[in-house]
Image: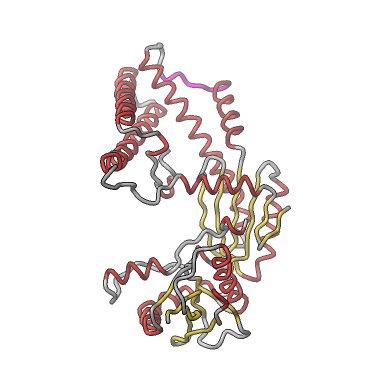
Amino acid sequence: MIVNRMVETDFPEEFIEEIEKSQDALPRRIDANPKNVEKGLAKLVLTLIELIRKLLEKQAMRRVEAGSLSEEEIERVGETLMKLENKMKELKEIFGLKNEELNINLGPLGDLI
Amino acid sequence: MKIYVYGIIDSNDGIGESTCGLEKANVYNIPYRDIGVVASDLIGPMPDVTEDNILAHEDVVESLMENFTVLPVRFHTVFDAKENILSMMGDYYTDFKDNLNRLRNKVEFGIKVIWPAEKIKEHITSCYWKSGRKEVVSDDSPIKRFIREKFEKYKIDKEFTEKANRLVTTIDIFLGKSAAEKKLEKLKTENLLLDGVYLVEKDKQSNFKEAFEHIRSARTDLRYLFSGPWPPYNFVILPKKSRPLKISEQATMFDKIIQKQNPVGADKT
């Protein structure tokens, strides 16, 4: 048991790791300067597109779950989502961006990724 | 000479025994009507952001907490002159007063809870496969495979979040009983189930601690970080309403007044 300035836990390392992880997930500012302005903007735009794509995906899954889509409609939705996901992969590759770089904190909804 | 500020207190009188602040400077109270700004003189340049300096700031705030209601001010808050402080107090007096009244005789406790996210997801996944799995599409084209995988992930994530919500609600039922206010954040990371702060009346501190001990002994599969009592860092509310200050001054002011500070800094763990 560690007791230090009114903080007590049996697992300090684990908490430090999780706190650091939660802080790393939130970029403090957009990293844009004359040398990487294109990438900086691409990151911002792709983050927003990723947000919209995930919202669409979630909405689609809710409708699938509710059983309100026919099999043909499910297939059409699936094709759209698959194409969107593939297009995003291509764009990320073009701008050299990784998945975890396209994160955004959605307040009470948590992080996008 | 500049003035370094530590906090705002519910007294316009002296702060009692001699207290040292940053760079061992004497800490004193600058009265404004019936409240005051606790500060020390800053002769040299802005103090560096070092663990010692942060803890020196923290020590002053915590010592104030013993005898007063205190609204902590962010580390590194410096004013050019006493007149600027008094002008700020004039503009924000009502808000400070409201906060001081609301936070009187209350302290903050922090609680963080880690759960074994990976194990829980594995369990949910295996339950999903074992029982009640609904086939959303019948054949096995790439598109249908894609949507099936997405749907399975959606269902597992949904159950994971619902499980987290249920557990946080259970924890909060115990802790919330002795708290006046709370701020809870769920799943900041997959493992960090709960990151919460509770505002607790001073005379209910032992009830709150007992409630925590009860949870800890009931759920030994979870890992806990419990901290406090702290000054009410996370419960000072300053509404961003129209002020007689210029826009640039407002921005600076709101940046300076602490609104949110992690109750458990890395330096304290």
Dominant secondary structure (helix, strand or loop) of the stretch shown in magenta = loop
Query: Looking at the image, which is closer to me, B167 or B89?
Result: B89
Compared to residue A78, the image places residue B63 above or below, namely: below
Total numbered circles:
0
Provide residue B246's location: percent of width, then percent of height: 26, 73
Q: Residue at x 47, y 46 (%)?
A: A24
Q: Quadrant of residue B241?
A: bottom left
Compared to residue B67, the image places residue A57 above or below, namely: above
Query: Looking at the image, which is closer to me, A110 or A104?
Result: A104
Q: Quadrant of residue B192?
A: top right
Q: Residue at x 53, y 22 (%)?
A: B132
Provide residue B39's location: percent of width, then percent of height: 49, 79
Query: Looking at the image, which is closer to me, B248 or B51?
Result: B51
Compared to residue B51, the image places residue A36 above or below, namely: above
Provide residue A27's location: percent of width, then percent of height: 40, 48
Q: Is residue B135 magenta?
A: yes
Q: Quadrant of residue B175?
A: bottom right
Compared to residue A56, the image places residue A82 above or below, namely: above
- Taking the image as shown, residue B86 lies to the left or right of residue B185, namely left
Provide residue A63's location: percent of width, then percent of height: 37, 29
Please give the range of residues in magenta. Answer: B131-136
Question: In the rendered view of the protein, which quadrant contains the N terminus of chain B?
Answer: bottom left
- Taking the image as shown, residue A113 lies to the left or right of residue B63, namely left
Query: Looking at the image, which is closer to me, B35 or A66?
Result: B35
Q: Is residue B72 magenta?
A: no
Question: In the rendered view of the protein, which quadrant contains the C terminus of chain B?
Answer: bottom right
